[in-house]
Image (cartoon, grey):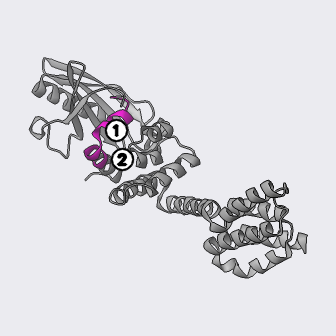
């Protein structure tokens, strides 16, 4: 039975083999090449051999063989050697094998980079590469622009901003493609962080996106920006000095808080006591950074008291 991580790897391989080979460091996207899955009859039963590809580039032909492991088994080196030898014998082509380790939680530490097959007087040594996905910079996957590489950001060396960017791109992709990509993203993130922690992280990211959209796309904020420009041109007034500016900021704050924390609606009455537009503007920035409803409530109450 395949583990979920291996299943996700299989799905990505079926949809974007070229992207997966680039992620494993085996075939840069900049190289002009033809990639064809190796015919089934040339490999072992599909549940054993993961992915083997016939590559043609610059007059050369060879086979790239990838094996994904959620947990690295003790017999991995022998298994990789066996598969590579069989593929080489059947295709008569050069074969390059790569073990892709998916989860840092099961990091086996330093591992052998070659395997031996000994059958009587016949000995075969097979060298292979080992890629630990958690060491791969997530920025490389984002820079590739390939949708099926986005879910793997969750397993790579990444910053919160890169997780957020992967999430944003999934939200903006074709509606027919997004469900599959997002399902892989949720699966892989859950494997790395645990289901509950990953769910909480995604919810936090979703709130941050919502905050950004409310601030950037709110008609009140857009009207406010337009009003500022008109005021600056017509009367040369400083930003935030017009009475309408404070009103627009209040509306933006109400929209933000109502969308994210409906239970805080009673607290919004205190906004009418704040007359200074610069204070309201600062409050918007602070609310965007608030991590939960409790923090947002304290901000609203403290600002209102100071201006009462």
In which quarter of the view is residue 212 placed? bottom right
In which quarter of the view is residue 67 placed? top left
Q: Position of residue 106 (x, y in %)?
A: 43, 44
Q: Identify the main secondary structure in magenta.
A: helix
Residue designated by label 1: 19
Please indicate, yes or no, whether residue 291 appears anywhere in the rendered image: no
Q: Which mark is residue 148?
A: 2
Residue 24 covered by magenta stretch: yes
| Residue sitting nearer the eye, 110 or 13 | 13
Residue 188 covered by magenta stretch: no
| Residue sitting nearer the eye, 288 or 114 | 288
Q: Earlier in the sequence, mark 1 or mark 2?
A: 1
The residue at the point 40 percent across, 57 percent down is: 182
Q: Position of residue 100 (x, y in %)?
A: 36, 37
Element type where label 2 sits in the image: helix
Please indicate, yes or no, whether residue 209 appears anywhere in the rendered image: yes
The residue at the point 24 percent across, 41 percent down is: 50
Which range is magenta? 11-27
Judge from the rendering whether residue 225 lies leftward or rightward of residue 76; answer left or right. right
Is disc 1 in contact with disc 2, using a CB cutoff of under 8 Å? yes
The residue at the point 23 percent across, 33 percent down is: 35
| Residue sitting nearer the eye, 116 or 154 | 154
Q: Position of residue 128 (x, y in %)?
A: 31, 26
In which quarter of the view is residue 228 placed? bottom right
Q: In this picture, is 62 found above or below 245?
A: above
Q: In this picture, is 141 found above or below 218?
A: above
Q: Residue furthest front?
A: 234
Judge from the rendering whether residue 208 lies leftward or rightward of residue 74; answer left or right. right
Q: Position of residue 38 (x, y in %)?
A: 16, 35
Quadrant of the snapshot with the C terminus: bottom right
Element type where label 1 sits in the image: helix
Judge from the rendering whether residue 277 lies leftward or rightward of residue 30; answer left or right. right
């Amino acid at each position: 039975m395949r583990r979920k991580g291996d299943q996700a790897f299989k799905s990505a391989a079926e949809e974007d083999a070229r992207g997966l080979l680039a992620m494993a460091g085996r075939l840069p996207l900049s190289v002009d090449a033809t990639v064809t899955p190796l015919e089934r009859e040339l490999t072992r039963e599909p549940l054993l051999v993961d992915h083997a590809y016939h590559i043609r580039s610059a007059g050369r032909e060879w086979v790239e063989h990838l094996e994904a492991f959620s947990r690295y088994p003790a017999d991995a080196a022998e298994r990789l050697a066996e598969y590579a030898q069989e593929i080489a014998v059947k295709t008569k082509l050069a074969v390059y094998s790569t073990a892709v380790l998916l989860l840092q939680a099961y990091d086996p530490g330093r591992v052998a980079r070659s395997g031996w097959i000994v059958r009587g007087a016949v000995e075969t040594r097979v060298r292979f590469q080992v890629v630990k996905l958690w060491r791969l910079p997530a920025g490389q996957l984002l820079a590739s622009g390939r949708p099926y590489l986005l879910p793997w950001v969750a397993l790579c060396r990444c910053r919160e901003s890169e997780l957020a960017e992967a999430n944003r791109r999934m939200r903006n992709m074709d509606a027919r493609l997004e469900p599959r990509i997002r399902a892989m993203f949720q699966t892989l993130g859950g494997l790395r962080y645990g289901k509950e922690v990953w769910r909480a992280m995604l919810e936090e990211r979703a709130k941050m996106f919502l905050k950004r959209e409310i601030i950037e796309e709110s008609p009140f904020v857009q009207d406010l920006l337009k009003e500022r420009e008109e005021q600056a041109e017509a009367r040369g007034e400083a930003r935030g000095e017009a009475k309408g500016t404070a009103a627009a900021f209040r509306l933006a704050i109400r929209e933000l808080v109502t969308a994210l924390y409906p239970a805080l609606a009673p607290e919004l009455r205190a906004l009418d006591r704040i007359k200074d537009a610069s204070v309201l503007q600062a409050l918007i920035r602070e609310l965007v950074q608030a991590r939960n409803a409790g923090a947002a409530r304290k901000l609203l109450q403290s600002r209102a008291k100071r201006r009462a």
